[in-house]
Amino acid sequence: MKESDFAALRQTMVAEIAAHTIFLTGRLGKAALGRRAIEAMAKVPRHAFVRLELQAVAYADTPLPSGYGKTISQPFIVALMTDLLDLQPTDIVLEIGTGLGYQAAVLAELALRVYSVELIEELADDARHRLARQGYGNVEVRTGDGRAGWPEHAPFDKIIVTAAPDLVPPSLIYQLKPGGKMVVPAGLPDEQQLLLLEKGSDGALSTREILPVRFSLLDPAEA
């Protein structure tokens, strides 16, 4: 496929995200995602962040296997989670679960710096190469325990978790800056909810359930 073909498929993907959002208006409380999140989705080449044999379906609105029992989230969910963070150009963001780097690339379009933690060394290495090839110099990836966050760079303006713990790890809440937001899928495998956590200036935490989801589990080895 040519780059022009991928670009056309990317625009179709964005249209499908818009339609999906309208369908969920009642639950989301709005009929459209923010302009900046949609522009990032329209720009990032998802086909550069999937396995070669899956490039032809890279822009389908569906999760895709990334290897090692993990998946790359469906584009609508990536767009929604990005939008919920309300990213600002000065934000420092922590991502838990790099995968092949697609979500990190979307974040990097909107934030100042992204720190991403991936448990599986092979995925982390792959993501580094993919992000570098696409010119995302504002993303740093390390292999490690996602539940522990990245204390050396805390506190973070925004935190996004791309695999589901049963409970939100306290260390991540601690590393969220007052006034910050965290988006995380959490719960037992058949009871996961996408959550938006907001930390007030006084440190008080509010939690909003967005919608039921099904994510890969945050690996028990990270517990």
Image (cartoon, rainbow, N blue to C red):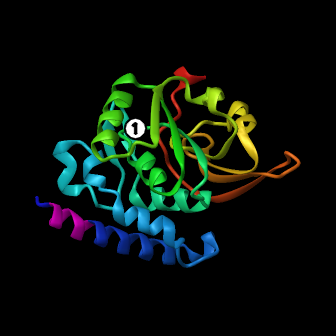
Q: 65 above or below 11?
A: above
- Quick one: 136 or 71, which is closer to the camera? 136
Quick check: 182 left or right of 62?
right
Measuring from the top left, give residue 74's x and y in whole percent.
Answer: 40, 55
Measuring from the top left, give residue 65's x and y in whole percent.
Answer: 31, 42
Number of numbered callouts drawn: 1
For the point 63% across and 36% down, the residue is 166
Q: In this view, which residue lies farthest toward the right?
A: 202
Q: Can you tell which quarter of the image residue 210 is in?
A: bottom right
**Residue 11 part of the magenta-drawn span:** no
Label 1 sits on a secondary structure element that is loop
> Disc 1 marks which amino acid?
Gly
Q: In this view, which residue lies farthest toward the left?
A: 1
Q: 122 above or below 217?
A: above
- Quick one: 192 or 71, which is closer to the camera? 71
Q: 113 above or below 40?
A: above
- Quick one: 165 or 124, which is closer to the camera? 124
For the point 36% across and 51% down, the residue is 63
Look at the image and tell me in which quarter the N terminus lies: bottom left
Measuring from the top left, give residue 70's x and y in whole percent.
Answer: 38, 36
Quick check: 179 left or right of 30?
right
For the point 55% across and 62% down, the residue is 83
Quick check: 148 left or right of 218?
right
- Label 1 sits on residue: 99
Q: What's drawn in magenta, residue-wise?
A: 3-9
Crowd tier of the residue under label 1, counting other residues whose Cα lies within 10 Å: few below 14, some 14–19, many 20 or above: many
> Is the magenta region chiefly helix, strand or loop?
helix
Measuring from the top left, give residue 178's x and y in whole percent.
Answer: 78, 47
Quick check: 4 left or right of 64?
left
For the point 64% across and 27% down, the residue is 152
Look at the image and tell me in which quarter the C terminus lies: top right
